[in-house]
Image (cartoon, rainbow, N blue to C red):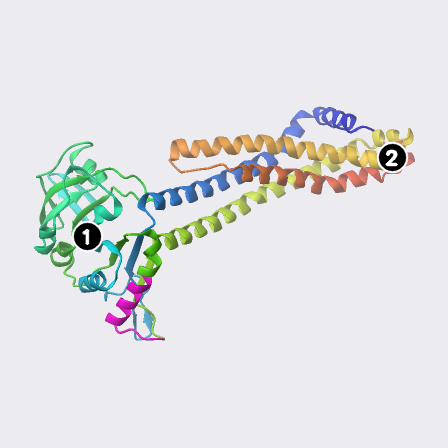
Amino acid sequence: MSIFMTFRIAFRALARNKMRTALTMLGMIIGVGAVITMVALGNGAQAQIEANIATAGTNIVNVNAGNFTSGGVRGGMGAANTLTAEDATAIREEVQGIRYMAAGITNRNRIIFGNQNWQARISGTDIDLPLIKAWTTEFGTFFSSQDVQTSAKVAVLGATVRDMLFGEGEDPTGQIVRIGNQPFKIIGVMTRKGQAALGEDQDDIVFVPYTTVQKKLMRATYIQNITVSAYSADDTTRIADQIAIVLRNRHKITPPDPDDFMVRTLEEMAAVRVQATETMTMLLAGIAGVSLVVGGIGIMNIMLVSVTERTHEIGLRLSIGARGWDVMMQFLVEAVVLSLIGGGIGIVSGFGFSRALTQFVQWPTSVSVDAVAMAFGFAAGIGVFFGFYPARKAARLDPIEALRYE
């Protein structure tokens, strides 16, 4: 029997009970749609991370406070308070190839203006940060080196903070706000930057001199991070290694003692984030794939019922010369058709869900050709795998017994 005739009989058999066929395909539709959506979410997150890294530049080195151990108890990464402004000065003087550098210390605090208030991240930094990040101001200017030296109470608002306190698009330069109990003069508003790679709002922030945060807000002598920009992206690895040497010498760290700081290039950070995203994508796709297996079991159950219902028909076909192979192919094709139609609808559904997530939830998604091919191939494989047993059972029926079946 020709393959064309086999498919024609398969479609006719499936059309006999449209509701049962639709419900059987539902498992495949949900499974394939879920896999496509989960992979699209993962791909979108990876693409956004890579785009943000490309925008920020590949010549950035981040130095952060590291682990602190006391009495055998580890405080965890970021717990050390041994990173100082003097360390930043030493790095500037001893490491060649540094273009810009900014010390940083951060806390969260309440910003108050009149009867409005907003909780935001207060980023104490230096004058080079806008140059490192290639950020510009929408209104006013960034603070000066004199502001840093004198620990001036000046602030540059992120766009989100400005919107919450003064209204969207307003120019609040010259106004006085309170951060904690301290009055600060607004000297500028940063241009809106949107979400970062991990979803945090880059505009929900207030920039002030790091010396002001140290002396007026936190009463601290340490800093939490140093951001370094190299003249050339090719020098970042060398600069990172030299920074580590300088800090080990200054902090008197000798093997096997662990470093109390972390030095990371932006490429290393991107690689870690992408790897974590890939792992999460595979996990979510695996969970979604369970529904594909459930859909395959549903197909096998329905095909077994179909074999029982069509026993007399099978016996008649075998008695007039059909081979067992023809019967097995017939039922196998029906199972594959169920899977492929369900998979096709699932792919369309996955595209739709992905678009909806991007449109309404603002989650980045990217549907790749590989994900579509994988989901469609998996659907076909499910049809073959779970359709084989019912098809073989139909092919092995005894023609005489099958004709007697009522």
SS type, badge 1: strand
Few, some or many residues within 10 Å of mark 2 (<14, 14–19, 20+): some
Question: x and y percent of residue 343 in the render?
Answer: 61, 34
| Residue appearing at x 50%, y 38% in the figure | 37
Quarter of the image for the N terminus: give it: top right
Query: Which of the two discs, 2 and 1, labels the residue nearer the N terminus?
Result: 1
Q: Nearer the viewer, mark 2 or mark 1?
A: 1
Q: Quadrant of residue 83?
A: bottom left
| Residue appearing at x 80%, y 40% in the figure | 393
Dot 1 amino acid type: Thr
SS type, badge 2: loop
Magenta span: 240-255
* Residue 41 visible to the viewer: yes
| Residue appearing at x 57%, y 44% in the figure | 289
Which residue in the structure is indicated by mark 2? 323
Q: Quadrant of residue 399?
A: top right
Which residue in the structure is indicated by mark 1? 125
Dominant secondary structure (helix, strand or loop) of the stretch shown in magenta: helix
Q: Is residue 136 left or right of residue 53?
A: left
Q: Is residue 159 left or right of residue 13?
A: left
Dot 2 amino acid type: Arg
Distance from label 2 to label 1 (Cα)?
A: 81 Å
The circle drawn on residue 166 is none
Quarter of the image for the C terminus: give it: top right
Residue 235 inside the magenta-drawn segment: no
Q: Is residue 206 above or below residue 241?
A: above
Question: x and y percent of residue 360 in the render?
Answer: 39, 32
Return the residue nearer the eye: 106 or 165.
Answer: 106
Question: x and y percent of residue 258 in the render?
Answer: 34, 70
* Residue 121 visible to the viewer: no
Residue 247 inside the magenta-drawn segment: yes
